[in-house]
Image (spheres, helix red, strand yellow):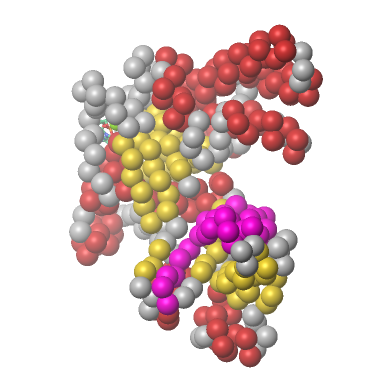
């Protein structure tokens, strides 16, 4: 999964990036260097830990989230001014909007409105360009009608996220990478003395009104926590009154937001978590591992993680009738331990 960190200049994007990844990218501005930071984190998963203890594999692989820390665009608060950045933003699965909220007069809700509006305008430009081209071709009435509907919404300064689309329309839209359709997690980057506090009611109300999900975090101190030695972390968190690091809350919120679940594969070589969206069928899930397994899919042998933990081994699960044989259309569940059978 790819997540982009987006926000105004000095909102704390790089600080949050460091907090999430434990890396030490330079905060306090690029000094003219408009570069993108990339980082990867492993998604902590107690199930993977447990299975790894049981199977003692050569390799243990957690699910991953890839972060891109975008620079603020050249024209300061204006996304439209930087088409290269927008092209990269179209490639992320979800966006974390970082709002500066560590000063009394920061006005994060205005920043939120600005960012959403900028994305709407960027999408409107794409829609209008495409419509102009289609008008000349006069060959794709369905796409024309669809884009007209999108244009109307965008012109009203509303995000495409708020619209429902048929499966056909989804197909037509998928290539555009519209920013205002991407799932958004709003991060209120607050001052150190607010560490550990929940989102204020006013912010919650505003997010609800917009149909968005959000978190409050104290980016700067949480960044310092993330950069600490693992052994020192827990004590420090207690000291400043943080029950759960924002990183963990962020990961959970992202999974919820994107409707993600993990299935697991086990063996002597590797124990691994794989991330798919809720509702993914077994054959598609197999394709996550390798396209050959998807193509040559025969069946999936499935044990629920909970059963495995209780019974302790695959053999015991089989004996107890807890190993299920599932076909290609089986809908994969969170925590399924799967062996795919395939032929090529
Ligand atoms: N007090 C406080 N300061 C913060 C916090 N987050 C960021 N800062 C400070 O704000 C400044 C900008 O932080 P960055 O993380 O570099 O912000 P950015 O959004 O990456 O900035 P650009 O990449 O230049 O757009 C730095 O001096 C940070 O130390 C915070 O939560 N609390
Ligand atoms: Mg930065």
Name the quarter showing ligand 2.
Answer: top left
Judging depth in this view, the residue of 323 and 21 nearest the camera is 323
Up-down relation of residue 221 to residue 236 (above or below): above
Q: Which residue is rendered at x = 69% and y = 75% of the image?
A: 325
The vertical placement of 203 against 268, above or below, is: above
Residue 25 sits inside the magenta stretch: no
Seen at 62% across and 58% down, the residue is 294
Q: What percent of the width, then of the height, locates residue 226?
A: 27, 52
- The residue furthest right is 141
Residue in the picture at 42% in, 77% down? 268
Name which residue lies at 56% across and 76% down.
Answer: 306
Q: Is residue 308 above or below residue 80?
A: below
Question: Where does the image place residue 149, in percent across and percent down from the top left?
Answer: 73, 21
To which quarter of the image does residue 72 belong?
A: top left
Left or right: residue 267 compared with residue 311: left
The answer to which quarter of the image holds residue 310 is bottom right
Q: What span is colored magenta in the figure?
A: 268-295
Residue 251: give x, y in percent of width and height.
45, 52
As displayed, is residue 302 above or below residue 134?
below
- Where residue 174 appears, as percent x and y from the top left, is 63, 34
Q: In which quadrant of the rendered image does the C terminus lie? A: bottom right
Q: Quarter of the image holding residue 320?
A: bottom right
Q: 59 or 82: which is nearer to us? A: 59
Q: Is residue 269 magenta?
A: yes
Q: Is residue 129 left or right of residue 137?
A: left
């Amino acid at each position: 999964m790819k997540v982009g960190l987006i926000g105004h200049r000095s909102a704390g994007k790089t600080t949050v990036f460091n907090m999430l990844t434990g890396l030490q990218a330079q905060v306090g501005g690029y000094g003219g260097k408009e570069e993108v930071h990339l980082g990867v984190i492993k998604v902590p998963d107690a199930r993977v830990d447990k299975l790894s203890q049981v199977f003692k594999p050569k390799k243990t692989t957690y699910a991953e989230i890839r972060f891109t820390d975008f620079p603020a665009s050249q024209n300061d608060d204006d996304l439209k001014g930087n088409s290269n950045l927008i092209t990269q933003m179209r490639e992320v699965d979800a966006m974390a909007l970082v709002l500066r909220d560590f000063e009394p007069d920061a006005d994060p809700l205005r920043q939120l409105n600005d960012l959403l509006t900028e994305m709407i305008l960027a999408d409107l430009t794409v829609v209008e360009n495409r419509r102009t081209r289609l008008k000349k071709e006069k060959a794709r009435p369905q796409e024309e009608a669809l884009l007209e509907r999108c244009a109307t919404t965008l012109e009203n300064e509303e995000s495409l996220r708020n619209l429902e689309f048929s499966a056909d329309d989804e197909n037509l839209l998928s290539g555009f990478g519209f920013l205002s359709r991407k799932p958004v997690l709003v991060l209120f980057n607050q001052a150190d003395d607010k560490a550990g506090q929940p989102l204020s009611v006013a912010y919650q109300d505003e997010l609800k009104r917009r149909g968005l999900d959000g978190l409050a975090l104290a980016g700067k101190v949480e960044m310092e926590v993330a950069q600490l030695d693992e052994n020192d972390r827990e004590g420090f968190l207690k000291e400043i009154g943080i029950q759960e690091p924002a990183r963990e809350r962020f990961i959970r919120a992202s999974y919820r937001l994107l409707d993600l679940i993990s299935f697991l594969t086990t063996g002597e070589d590797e124990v691994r978590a794989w991330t798919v969206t809720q509702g993914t069928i077994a054959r598609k899930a197999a394709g996550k591992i390798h396209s050959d397994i998807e193509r040559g899919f025969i069946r999936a042998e499935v044990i629920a993680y909970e059963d495995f933990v209780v019974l302790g081994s695959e053999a015991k699960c089989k004996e107890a009738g807890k190993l299920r044989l599932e076909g290609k259309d089986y809908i994969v569940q969170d925590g399924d331990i799967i062996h795919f059978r395939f032929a090529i």
